[in-house]
Image (tube, helix red, strand yellow):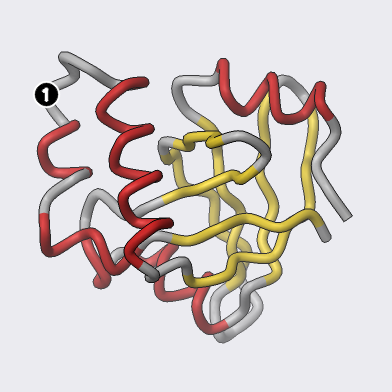
């Protein structure tokens, strides 16, 4: 299964999206994050590192959703810690968010292992 070309276009054009995760007690949380699209691959990363609630919840329960443009896209969050995925995500963040003061933190060495690939669910 793949994201549609329209969904990929919207994800690529969006500066911020909301990721919906579910806590261990079933509570649904929404967090604003950045997203990059490389070809047909959707990549996300925690700017706050592995301690971020949304990231921990996505690892524990990879059934997530992305909210953008009035849509809810169901997805599965999959660790993308291979060097190629990490570099593709970093390059995408540098390109898409060039000049943003948070970009250096997003591509900081400590945050690289938090790279996740979103697969449509």
Quarter holding residue 48: bottom left
| Quadrant (top left/top right/bottom left/bottom right) for the N terminus | bottom right
User: For numbered disc 1, what is the local secondary structure?
Assistant: loop
Instruction: From the top left corner, tell me how far across and down residue 9 is, in percent.
Output: 69, 20
Instruction: From the top left corner, tell me how far across and down residue 55 is, in percent.
Output: 41, 66
Is 38 left, or right, of 114 in this rendering?
A: right
* Picture residue at 22% right of the left edge, 43% below the top: 106
The residue that disc 1 covers is 101
Nearer-the-camera pick, 60 or 29: 60
Is 34 left, or right, of 78 in this rendering?
A: left
Asked if residue 32 is positioned above or below residue 46 in the image, the reply reads above
Instruction: From the top left corner, tell me how far across and down residue 89 is, in percent.
Output: 38, 45
Is 61 left, or right, of 98 in this rendering?
A: right
Nearer-the-camera pick, 115 or 91: 91
Quarter holding residue 81: bottom left
Circle count: 1
Q: Residues within 10 Å of mark 1 (few under 14, many from 20)?
A: few
Asked if residue 85 is positioned above or below residue 50 in the image, the reply reads above
Quarter holding residue 22: bottom right
Instruction: From the top left corner, tell me how far across and down residue 59 is, in percent.
Output: 50, 78
């Amino acid at each position: 299964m793949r994201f549609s070309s329209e969904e990929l276009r919207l994800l690529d054009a969006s500066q911020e999206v909301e990721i919906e995760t579910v806590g261990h007690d079933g509570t649904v949380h929404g967090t604003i994050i950045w997203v990059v699209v490389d070809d047909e691959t959707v990549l996300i990363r925690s700017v706050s590192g592995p301690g971020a609630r949304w990231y921990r919840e996505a690892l524990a329960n990879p059934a997530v959703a992305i909210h953008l443009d009035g849509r809810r896209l169901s997805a599965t969050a999959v660790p993308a810690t291979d060097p190629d995925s990490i570099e593709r995500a970093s390059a995408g963040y540098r390109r898409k968010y060039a000049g943003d003061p948070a970009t250096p933190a997003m591509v900081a060495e400590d945050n690289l292992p938090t790279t996740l690939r979103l697969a449509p669910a």
